[in-house]
Image: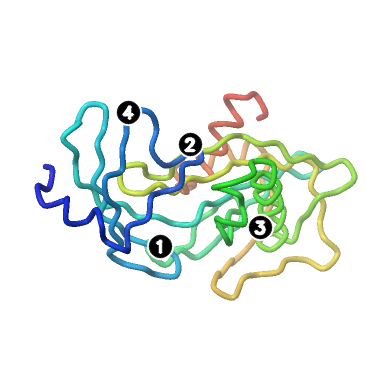
């Protein structure tokens, strides 16, 4: 239900319009009337947004979580195996198998509100960085990085979106991985396509980034 007191937010100095990059932000028929910061944390920000939509011109209040945008990489080795990391995830209190992934450190540096060429360069660099840090593998002479598009991780409450990539022909880096101090990767292992499909079918793989990557790879006949 719309909040009839939303007008008090319009002149709030904390109001900041969401990014308008073609992926998030207002699209035709949509209008952000107010955007009030409720919680400002290092990894997520929570806003109360009052938004007019094509079917709700009177406006509607929504709680929106905003996080840094992310990348996820489906790495395939020269011998055709897929690299997955077994990573501890605090919210679910367990370690799960995933394709390597991570946040773009600074949305402004990624050009979300500016030059799309600069944005793509930073996003691709982030993909290669996350691959090296989490797996110890990197690009080789015959490697290629192919964009698989984006997906929204949970569009009902957050504008977070993830850039998906297929890194084919990756090779082991001579110096291994560079683990982030805030992450705990228990293991990195290479799986055949048959093993990966079996893990998805059985429900062993439950990570949204990994499932989205695999779905896109399948649709594009890369698997």
Helix, strand or loop status at disc 1: loop
In the picture of the structure, the residue carrying the numbered disc 2 is 201
Q: Earlier in the sequence, mark 2 or mark 1?
A: 1
Residue closest to the eye, 56 or 78: 56
**In x, y percent, where is residue 29?**
32, 28
Mark-to-mark CA distance, 2 and 4? 40 Å
Mark-to-mark CA distance, 4 and 3? 37 Å
Task: Identify the image quadrant of the N terminus.
Answer: top left
The residue shown at (32%, 33%) is: 30
In the picture of the structure, the residue carrying the numbered disc 3 is 130
Residue closest to the eye, 12 or 36: 12
In the picture of the structure, the residue carrying the numbered disc 4 is 29
Residue 131: numbered disc? none
Looking at the image, residue 14 sits to the left or right of residue 152; the answer is: left
Mark-to-mark CA distance, 3 and 2? 26 Å
Residue 44: numbered disc? 1
Q: Earlier in the sequence, mark 3 or mark 2?
A: 3
Q: Earlier in the sequence, mark 4 or mark 3?
A: 4
The extreme right residue here reads 141
């Amino acid at each position: 239900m719309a909040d009839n007191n939303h007008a008090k937010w319009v002149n709030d100095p904390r109001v900041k319009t969401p990014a308008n990059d073609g992926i998030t932000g207002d699209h035709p028929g949509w209008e952000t009337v107010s955007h009030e910061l409720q919680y400002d944390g290092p990894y997520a920000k929570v806003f109360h947004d009052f938004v007019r939509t094509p079917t709700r011109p009177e406006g509607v209040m929504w709680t929106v979580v905003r996080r840094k945008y992310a990348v996820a990489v489906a790495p395939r080795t020269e011998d055709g195996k897929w690299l997955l990391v077994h990573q501890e995830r605090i919210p679910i209190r367990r370690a799960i198998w995933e394709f390597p992934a991570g946040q773009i450190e600074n949305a402004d540096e990624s050009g979300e509100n500016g030059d799309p060429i600069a944005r793509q360069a930073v996003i691709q660099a982030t993909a290669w960085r996350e691959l090296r840090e989490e797996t110890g593998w990197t690009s080789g002479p015959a490697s290629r990085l192919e964009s698989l598009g984006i997906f929204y991780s949970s569009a009902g409450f957050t504008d977070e979106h993830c850039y998906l990539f297929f890194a084919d022909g990756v090779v082991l880096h001579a110096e291994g991985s560079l683990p982030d101090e805030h992450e705990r990767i228990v293991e990195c292992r290479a799986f055949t396509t048959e093993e990966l499909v079996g893990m998805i079918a059985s429900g062993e793989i439950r990570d949204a980034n990994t499932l989205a990557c695999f779905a896109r790879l399948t649709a594009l006949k890369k698997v």
